[in-house]
Each structure stands twice: as structure tokens, then as C-alpha cells.
Amino acid sequence: MAKTKINVLSDEVIGKISAGEVVERPASVVKELIENSIDAGADSIDIEIQEAGTSLIRVADNGEGMTEDDAKLSCMRHTTSKIKDAVNLYNIRTLGFRGEALASIAAVSRMDIITCTGGDDPATKLYLESGEILESMPAGRVRGMTIEVKNLFYNIPVRRKFLRKKATELAAVIDTVGRFILSFPDIDIKLSHDGKELLHATRDMGLEQRIQLILGGDVSGEMVDIALSEGDYTLSGYISRPSSTRKDKQAQMFFVNNRFVRSKALSDALSEAYRSLLERGRYPSAVLFLGLDPGEIDVNVHPTKLQVKFEDERAVKNVISEAVKVKFEQIKTKTSREKGISLPEEFREPENAARGDIAEVQTEFDYEAAGTPAPDNVPLAPEKAIFQLGNCYIVEINKNHLKVTDQHAAHERILYEFFSKAKVNHAPDVQNLLFPIQLELTASEQATMGKLLDDFRGLGFQIEPFGSRSYVVQSIPAVLKDSDVADVIRNVLLDMSQADLAKTDVID
Ligand code: ADP
Ligand code: MG
């Protein structure tokens, strides 16, 4: 036979390739292992990592465990106890089902499994390298499973090299664990890093307390609970009041049948529900749980199941907007009953200039002289008028032209110019705050803040730690005196945790 160009790949290569889909970074290992613990019925999960998970990830649970034979099978590709055939695929109630995670993780690490089913079966310990079982021996352990993943990607140097900075990987792990803490309030979940406890949600903490643990008091303190059940759908959770929004969607978390998902459909639905109550570029915070018939979603569209496809996206959107509407109506009537006024300020639309107001009206044209009553904010045929519309635009009317400036964009530009100069001059003007701002960070923001404190200080922010995740801002660069300082700081933390920028770019 002539030489062929097509090769049949070895199992080792296949293993490494498919591992790449499931195991992207330490956080994805943590996610898969926690899912397994939950599927095994554990109500206590202890996660310990070292060096942001690059040297060690250890997950110990008190679930149903495995026998020696099952443990050996579990590390092979496409082995699962959760489904039997294709029929099951559309009625999945466990978090896992593909039978790929353990095999994939094993393929790219050194792995120890110690597990016991309790009862009469003895505990087993397996040791694997690159997916191959090298040792199997009896061990001592109570019911449950402990899995240790060491030197992740030690056999795929490129992957190891492309891991982000430790702070970034750690933040991703914290985010991952945080999502389980929110969606499984009956499970005791603990995370430690390099021997230091970062998160611990005990079983007696309700959802509200868990939200506070994960998102910090600043966000959770401004949230209200919502609940609605309609037809096949149930929606529950917490959403922010319209007055307390953020510039990013970091504090929006959606869970579908208790599985964390990223969903543009859900996030759009939420924004639409707030629609006229939000300024442009502001987003509500939310921790929302949507429950529906598993047959109505496809969780099999994404290797790590981060995305889902809804059979009836419109119905889902409707449920969200309905629930938000109902809640806000309740708040409105409640407040108006209590205070005897019509609408709480936060529920008035910015278009009505309730929040923005007209900051200044400069006009060379005298109203009064015209003798005509003018509408509130529209000067009649002025020679020249400048006013602020809503809280967003500066409108300049001249005899024959109209100029609209996006105020936020303009402001950002000014700030950018300032900081670029600060980079060269190294001496920004500092404004001391009469009332220091207290800031409570989310768990992952905190991880980034640790690394950035000095950079902030170099720019004129005097930020001091104040309790475990709280900071006090005592001074700020003078140019920011009219900005929402907490917002600016959060944005920098977000950018830095996502884009793994070089240090000098912090300033930009
Ligand atoms: P999947 O979760 O998709 O079934 P995995 O590769 O993650 O695939 O796990 C394979 C099997 O190993 C699971 O189906 C389960 O039976 C078993 N298993 C994995 N982790 C645990 C655990 N922590 N406790 C008990 N059994 C487990
Ligand atoms: Mg699994």
C-alpha cells in the first residue's frame, strides 16, 4: 500500500486534545471536581489550592465515593455513572454527564484519587500520570472522595506557559467557587489558597448571607428579592434596586436549573426589564435562578456547559421582565404608601430629568422678555443655549446647528488625558476626601486589589485595607473629584483581572 498521509491518533494524543476542551485553566478543574462532588451527593466540599491551582488542586467531599473498580473506570474517557444512552441526554438532572472530566484532568496532570463508599468496601488510592494508572492500593478514608491534581499541564508546556498571572487564575477560581456557594446553599463549601482560607460558606448561611459573602456588602445591601412562577418556569433570586447599578455586568449571575450559565439572552432580558430606569451604560446586579423543564434547554452546546440554548427564549425573557416589573410595582406602592408620595426617586425615568436634572441653562435669550411661557427644559428659539439632557448628554443649540456631546465619553477622555500625563509627570494632584469612601469588594475583586494597591497609590489614591474585604479610600487624584470613585476603582479591578495587562497599562 502506498504511504498514506492520514494518521490514526494515539489515545495519548486524543486524550490531550479533548482535555484542552474541558480543562482550560485551574478554575475549570475546580469547576469539574466540585460538580462531581455535588453529583455524588456531598454536603461538604473542601477545596484547597496552591499557587493559584497550578501546583495543587485538592477537593475533598463526603459524597457517595467509589469502589476500586469504579474508581479505575472513572478515569477513562467517556465513562460515567450518570447516563446510559441517548434517551437520557435530554433529561439531565446531574451537573456532569459526559464522562470526560476525570479522564481529561488526569491526562494533563499528576493525579491522586482516594475514595471510599463507606460500609464494608475498603478505601482505594490511585495514582495516575498523564492519564495512566501507575498505582492502585488500599488506603484509609471515610466515605467520600479526595482528589489531588498536581502540576497541571506539566506535560503540555505550551498550556502551562499560556496560563495567566497567578492573581488572574486565582480570581477565576474564586469566581468559580463563588458560583457554587450561591447555587447550593445546603452545601458547606470552603476554599483555601496557600494555606489561607478565602471563602467559607457554612450550611446555616442563607442565600442572602451567601450573596454578601461573594459579592460584598456594597452590592448585596442594595438588592431586593424576587420570585415568580409562571407555567413551566420559576424564577427566584435577588436583583439590585435601579438606583444601585454598576458599569459592568460582573455582578450579574444567572443559574439555569441551578447551573451557572453565561447568557446574553438572560442579561438582555434583565436590562430590558429595567429599561427606562437605567442610565446608558449602567447594568443591574442580579443573582437569578431560573428553573424549567430540562427538556426545554440544551446544555450540550458548549464543552464546559457554560452556555445553554433555550427552546423558547421569548418565554424565558418574559418571565424575567414580568418578575422585575411585579417587584418594582410592589416597591413603588409600598414606598408611596409609607411616605405618602407618588414615586421613589429611583423609579423615575432619567428622561424625565428626575435624576439628571438640567444642570445649567446658558442662554443669551431672555425667557421672560419673550413673554411666552416656555416648556421646562426647552428654550424657545434661543440664539445659543447649552443644557444637560438627562444625565448623559450636553446639548448645544446654536442658530443653525445642534451639537450633542456624550458627557460620559467626554469625561472619560478628559480622565484619560490626565492619567497619561500623570504617567509622565509622576505627580498627580491629590484631593483628600472629607468623608472617606468605604468600599467592600467582591471576593475576586479582592484578589486583584491585593496586587494593585501600590499602583493605585502611585496615581494619588490613598487606599487602606479595612477588614478582610473592605477598603477605605482617603484621597483620590484631584481630577476624579466629580467621579463615582468606587466605580472607577471597580472598573480598574475588573479590567486588570480580565485583561492580563502589563503593569504600566494600569494607568491607561
Ligand atoms: P461525569 O461527571 O460527566 O459523569 P466525570 O469524568 O466527571 O464524568 O466522572 C466520571 C464518574 O466518576 C462519574 O460519573 C461518577 O460516577 C464518578 N465520580 C467522579 N467524581 C466523584 C466523586 N467526587 N464522588 C463519587 N463519584 C465520583
Ligand atoms: Mg463530572
Image (spheres, helix red, strand yellow):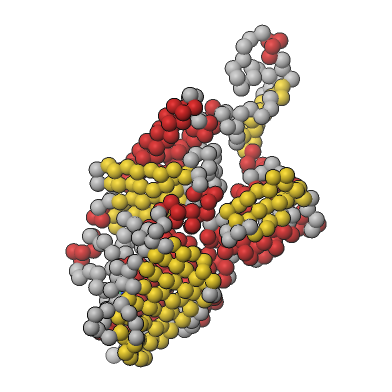
Which residue occupies the foreground of this view, 293 or 46? 46
Which residue occupies the foreground of this view, 140 or 160? 140
Q: Quadrant of residue 58?
A: bottom left
Residue at the (72%, 46%) spot, across then down: 433
The vertical placement of 91 against 375, above or below, is below
* Image position of 10 (left or right of 242): left
Residue at the (54%, 75%) spot, across then down: 194
On-image quarter of the C terminus = bottom right
The vertical placement of 96 against 340, above or below, is below
Residue lying furthest top in this view?
371
Residue at the (27%, 78%) spot, across then down: 117
Residue 89 placed where, x, y %?
A: 23, 63
* Image position of 406 (left or right of 329): right
Residue at the (35%, 47%) spot, across then down: 236
Residue 128 placed where, x, y %?
A: 38, 86
On-image quarter of the N terminus = bottom left
Residue 310 placed where, x, y %?
A: 31, 51
* Image position of 379 (left or right of 417): left
